[in-house]
Amino acid sequence: MAPSEPETPERNTPSVEAAFQAAPPELIAEILDGELHISPHPARPQLNAMSNLVPLLGMPFMFGKGGPGGWVILHLPEMHLGPRPDKLVPDLAGWTRERLPDAIGGEDSPAHFDLAPDWVCEILSEHTRRIDRVQKMHIYAREGVRHVWQVDPRARTLDIFWLQESRWLLVHSLAGEERVRAEPFDAIELELALVWSE
């Protein structure tokens, strides 16, 4: 007689799903490994860095102005990833247009995305630092996200990770006002000073 396989623990129980759906809109709800996490929307330092990164990357990589284009970059997209899905809301996420040719979708398209992005940027805060650096990184690796940036606006640092054989490799740790070429957007030089500018 074959040994029985261990039972998979139940995830996303009805009570967790109900709490996720009932979260007030002024908060960000996520389900990570079956557990509900509620976070405030980004505070001013995080919001400033996020708002600065959108045009710095968007003009050259979304619109091809001074760069190659070819990307869809969204802020705070809701993503449902995995079989009993983890529900994540990264600060920024990017897909190559060949992988996500119809980013807007039709009227019947869900508000969330089921396709893992090619790049994620998490803007670290005291409320989200642990889940951004541990739980979400595990999920992003499982789903094959190739590049993750972790931005700390208070410390003015940018850590760049590549996924290599299902493990994260820290390839650059940058700080202050450096000018950098940061994968996967290394076709242009990024001025870190502009990320922190107010």
Image (spheres, rainbow, N blue to C red):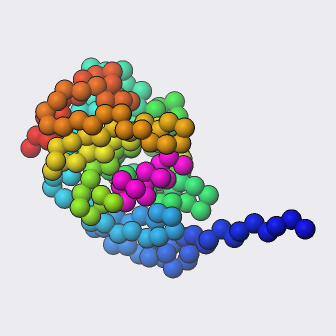
Can residue 92 be seen here? The reply is yes
The residue furthest right is 1
Q: Is residue 45 above or below residue 68?
A: below
Q: Is residue 135 a member of the stretch shown in magenta?
A: yes
Residue range of the region highlighted in magenta in the rendering? 131-142
The residue nearer to you, when weighing 153 against 21, is: 153
Left or right, residue 148 beside residue 80:
left
Q: Position of residue 59 (x, y in %)?
A: 27, 29
Question: In terms of image quadrants, where is residue 10?
Answer: bottom right
Q: Is residue 172 above or below residue 34?
A: above
Q: Main secondary structure of the magenta part?
A: helix
The residue nearer to you, when weighing 42 against 144, is: 144
Question: In terms of image quadrants, where is residue 180?
Answer: top left
Q: Position of residue 91 (x, y in %)?
A: 32, 50
The residue furthest left is 198
Q: Is residue 46 above or below residue 67?
A: below
What residue is at 75 percent from the left and 66 percent from the top? Answer: 5
Can residue 58 be seen here? The reply is no
Q: Position of residue 190 (x, y in %)?
A: 23, 28
Left or right, residue 56 beside residue 19:
left
Question: In which quadrant will I find the C terminus?
Answer: top left
Total labels drawn: 0
Q: Is residue 162 a member of the stretch shown in magenta?
A: no
What residue is at 51 percent from the left and 64 percent from the top? Answer: 33
Q: Position of residue 67 (x, y in %)?
A: 31, 21
What residue is at 82 percent from the left and 67 percent from the top? Answer: 3
Left or right, residue 149 beside residue 139:
left
What residue is at 55 percent from the left and 60 percent from the top? Answer: 85
Question: In which quadrant will I find the N terminus?
Answer: bottom right
The residue nearer to you, when weighing 160 against 91, is: 160
